[in-house]
Image (spheres, rainbow, N blue to C red):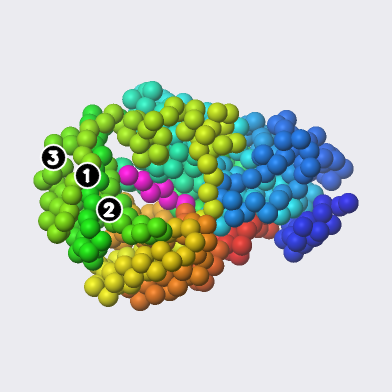
């Protein structure tokens, strides 16, 4: 069966035919490998293992983090061992007209790191971490998971800002933004990138930084995973491990929910850059509200710094303690009582013990404080969620600080004028609740959305994710990937 027929059988005919036609044209122009020299199988083209559908081990390597996408089954999963192997896989798929998706940690909210039919390029074998103390930089391979990044850098007295989910891959979180609990102090993950190594659709391995391929350097910082090429390594500027770090958690009675939201949104985006905070509205078997966060300083200062939150009726500082920085990252990852080996999702690393999840999500950005009516919408939505299967949450991630000191056009990440991001989450059902809550908040939010919380049902996603930067991103995509080999339903230029 031909590669195009294989893709058509899997429901990918349009993309496969376009890709095959484009590659054929390129071959005729003499800018691609001669078809006769393309190996017959992907396993012959690359050195890393290739797991084909139905073969031993395929089921385990084909799944992504979100159980909602277990029915999406690729034709093969390839695990390259280095950048040259990635290049070989890209060239083979392009020449054969086989759709490809790259996967780092497999956490794409919309399941875009897998596909039915075609090839998943699993980067989990690329996970080296090295530190250049003299340059103040670290080179991290694309398949490294965040808990390993924190541990590997901490061994050298260094860190970068990133998220808290331990099994998220550094590639996906960086390319789309990288919000985490050190972001207001150190910026987003992408703000700390000084260089990339990336394989583009023509199979070239490119060094990308402010001096080499500067347009692509701009686009990769916020353009989102799956666009432009496959990044194989990142070079980050690193920060010394903070001399002190503290965790805090403030809780309120449900009767104070509206006042708590008002207090948090007036405080969190404007307080000292050393604090990054998340506000939680939780629903399921009851409702609760709290705000937690990280302070890059001693816990003894927290009661004073948290004063605006503690002035809300019924407020209680339920946790405030000092911690070593790596231990605090383990706590935020939910791994404070287990070892680093166990702090991985089952199946992604030997010895991993963390479970997968089934969830759906949407997001908004807030550029003006939510009025009382908007706060009531969120409170009512949380109360409604209790009558549905599963559970839900509405989370606010505080922006400001170092995040907002970057111009909206300095990188592809445009969301630099926002107070905070709202993430709406629904676990094990409640899809209608998610859509209704998101729609009810529309008139109170900025119209932007976070590309790392990518949402397959979002209309107008081009402007919501990229705003004024979208036209430039399209132009760079046409230049670097003219035949749109790297493609998915919300790919730039789609």
Residue 115 versus residue 59 in the image, above or below: below
User: Quick one: label 3 or label 1, which is nearer the N terminus?
Assistant: 3
Residue 317 versus residue 124 in the image, above or below: below
Q: Residue 155's x, y, as percent? A: 38, 23
Q: What residue is rendered at 68% in x and 58% in y?
A: 483
Residue that mark 3 sits on:
301
In the shown orientation, is residue 30 left or right of residue 112? right
Q: Quadrant of residue 481?
A: bottom right
Cβ–Cβ under 8 Å for marks 3 and 1: no
**Residue 27 in magenta stretch:** no
Q: Distance between the residues labelled 3 and 2?
A: 19 Å
Residue that mark 1 sits on:
318
Label 1 CA crowd tier, 10 Å (few <14, some 14–19, many 20+): few
Label 3 CA crowd tier, 10 Å (few <14, some 14–19, many 20+): few
Residue 437 versus residue 226 in the image, above or below: below
In the shown orientation, is residue 32 left or right of residue 370? right
Q: Give the range drawn in magenta.
A: 176-181
Q: What residue is rendered at 79% in x and 49% in y?
A: 96
Q: Residue 397's x, y, as percent? A: 33, 54
In the shown orientation, is residue 61 left or right of residue 182? right
Q: For the stretch drawn in magenta, what is the main secondary structure?
A: loop
**Circle 1 — which element?**
strand
Q: In which quarter of the image is residue 420?
A: bottom left
Looking at the rendered image, the disc whose residue lies closer to the viewer, 3 or 1, is 1
**Circle 2 — which element?**
strand
Question: What label sits on residue 290 in the rendered view?
Answer: 2
Cβ–Cβ under 8 Å for marks 1 and 2: yes
**Circle 3 — which element?**
helix
Q: What residue is rendered at 34% in x and 30% in y?
A: 327
User: Quick one: label 1 or label 2, which is nearer the N terminus?
Assistant: 2
Q: What residue is rendered at 61% in x and 42% in y?
A: 199
Q: Residue 295's x, y, as percent? A: 23, 41
């Amino acid at each position: 069966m031909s590669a195009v027929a294989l893709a058509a059988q899997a429901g990918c005919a349009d993309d496969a035919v376009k890709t095959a036609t484009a590659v054929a044209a390129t071959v005729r122009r003499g800018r691609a490998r001669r078809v006769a020299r393309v190996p017959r199988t992907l396993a012959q083209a690359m050195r890393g293992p290739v797991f084909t559908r139905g073969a031993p081990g395929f089921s385990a390597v084909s799944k992504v983090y979100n159980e909602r996408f277990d029915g999406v089954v690729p034709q093969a999963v390839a695990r390259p061992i280095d950048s040259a192997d990635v290049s070989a896989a890209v060239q083979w798929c392009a020449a054969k007209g086989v759709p490809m998706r790259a996967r780092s940690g497999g956490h794409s909210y919309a399941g875009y790191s897998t596909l039915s039919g075609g090839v998943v390029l699993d980067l989990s074998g690329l996970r080296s971490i090295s530190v250049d103390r003299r340059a103040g930089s670290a080179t991290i391979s694309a398949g490294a998971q965040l808990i390993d990044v924190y541990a590997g850098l901490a061994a050298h007295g260094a860190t970068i800002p990133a998220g808290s989910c331990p099994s998220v891959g550094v590639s996906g979180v960086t390319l789309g933004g990288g919000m985490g609990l050190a972001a207001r102090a150190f910026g987003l993950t992408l703000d700390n990138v000084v260089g990339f190594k990336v394989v583009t659709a023509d199979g070239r391995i490119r060094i990308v930084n402010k001096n080499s391929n500067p347009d692509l350097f701009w686009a990769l910082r916020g353009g989102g995973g799956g666009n432009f090429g496959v990044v194989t390594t990142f070079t980050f500027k690193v920060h010394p491990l903070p001399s002190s770090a503290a965790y805090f958690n403030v809780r309120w009675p449900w009767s104070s929910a509206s006042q708590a939201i008002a207090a948090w949104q007036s405080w969190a985006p404007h307080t000292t850059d050393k604090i990054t905070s998340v506000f939680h509205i939780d629903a399921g078997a009851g409702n609760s509200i709290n705000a937690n966060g990280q302070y890059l300083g001693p816990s003894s200062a927290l009661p004073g710094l948290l004063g605006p939150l503690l002035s809300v009726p019924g407020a209680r500082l339920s946790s405030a303690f000092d911690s070593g920085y790596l231990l605090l990252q383990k706590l935020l990852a939910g791994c404070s009582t287990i070892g680093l080996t166990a702090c991985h999702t089952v199946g992604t690393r030997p010895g991993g013990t963390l479970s997968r999840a089934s969830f759906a999500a949407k997001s908004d950005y807030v550029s003006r404080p939510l009025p009382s009516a908007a706060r009531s919408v969120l409170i009512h939505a949380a109360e409604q969620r209790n009558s549905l299967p599963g559970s839900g949450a509405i989370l606010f991630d505080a922006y400001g600080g170092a995040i907002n000191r970057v111009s909206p056009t300095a990188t592809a990440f445009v969301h630099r004028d926002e107070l905070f991001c709202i993430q709406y989450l629904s676990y094990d059902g409640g899809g209608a609740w998610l859509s209704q809550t998101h729609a009810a908040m529309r008139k109170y939010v900025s119209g932007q959305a976070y590309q790392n919380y990518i949402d397959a049902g979002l209309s107008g996603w081009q402007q919501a994710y990229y705003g004024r930067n979208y036209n430039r991103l399209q132009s760079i995509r046409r230049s670097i990937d003219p035949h749109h080999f790297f493609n998915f339903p919300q790919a730039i230029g789609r």
